[in-house]
Amino acid sequence: MLRTTLFSLVCAITTASTALGGLLSPGSSVTTTGTNALSSPHAYGTLVHAQVDDFNIFSSFGALLYNGKLESMVFQNSAGELTFDLAVIDSESGLNGVIAEIGRNGFSGWTTDVDWRADALGLKDPAMATRTFNGDKIEWKGPWSGTSGIFSGETSRMMFASTDATAFMPQSAIARITLTTGEFVDIEVAAPIPGPGALALLGLAGCVAGGRRRRRG
């Protein structure tokens, strides 16, 4: 069941002031200590997209290591800016897998503010988040509340990436859940429509390709 009650309650206090808080720049990392609607109003708003995907992670020998669900949501604040959430829920107990990292791509060209929701359900919270040098991918990492990860039967906190994007596309990016032993699963999730930086690179690539085609003609 989608956990939207909390967000409906805090929508009323979301204001037009949406300056991002703990910014995560490309190639950097940030400590994630948890936040709430009062401290980070820009990360709250109206639910505009939600999906829940079942996932399984197997060993190279075909043994089931982890089974659960990935909950993915998109919220839009009063200024029209979008926040993208992920959480691992309903995991099966008694399995041997332990989640080490949860990441997602699709953020190239956008400003991001990354943390986890202290006022939402969930058991294990990440200690930090990192972003790749090209700005595309964000990963949340442990120690996951003092242990080596998210064990089978446990849930994660709701991790979010607030952006200055105002439009998104469902199933346009990949969320990757990786175990401590290296096995992983990829799940399609929503992402911002390519940011201005990414569009500029695409345009430059198109111009170069066009120039090359003209020279060959």
Image: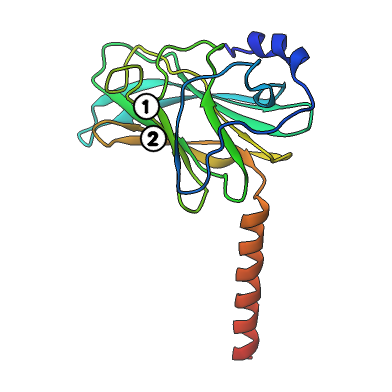
Question: Up-down: is 192 above or below 121?
Answer: below
Q: Is residue 5 above or below residue 102?
A: above
- The residue tagged 1 is 56
| Residue occupying the point 37% across, 13% down | 154
Q: Position of residue 119 (x, y in %)?
A: 56, 11
**Residue at 59%, 25% in the rendered image:** 51
Which secondary structure, mark 1? strand
- Quarter occupied by the C terminus: bottom right
Quarter of the picture holding the N terminus: top right
Q: Where, by quadrant of the figure, is residue 101 drawn?
A: top left
Q: Assess whether mark 2 and mark 1 are in contact (beta carbons under 8 angstroms).
A: yes
- Residue at 52% from the left image edge and 39% from the top image edge: 24
- Crowd band around label 1 with a 10 angstrom C-alpha radius: few (<14), some (14–19), many (20+): some
Q: Position of residue 145 (x, y in %)?
A: 35, 17
Instruction: Name the residue carrying label 2.
Output: 185
The answer to whether residue 109 is left or right of residue 27 is: right
Count up the numbered dots: 2
Residue at x 71%, y 8% (from the top left corner)? 9
Position of residue 46 relative to residue 174, above or below, is above
Query: Looking at the picture, which amino acid does disc 2 mark?
Result: Val
Residue type marked 1: Asn
Quarter of the view holding residue 31: top left
Query: What is the x, y in percent for residue 196?
Result: 68, 54
In terms of depth relative to the viewer, which is nearer, 95 or 40? 40
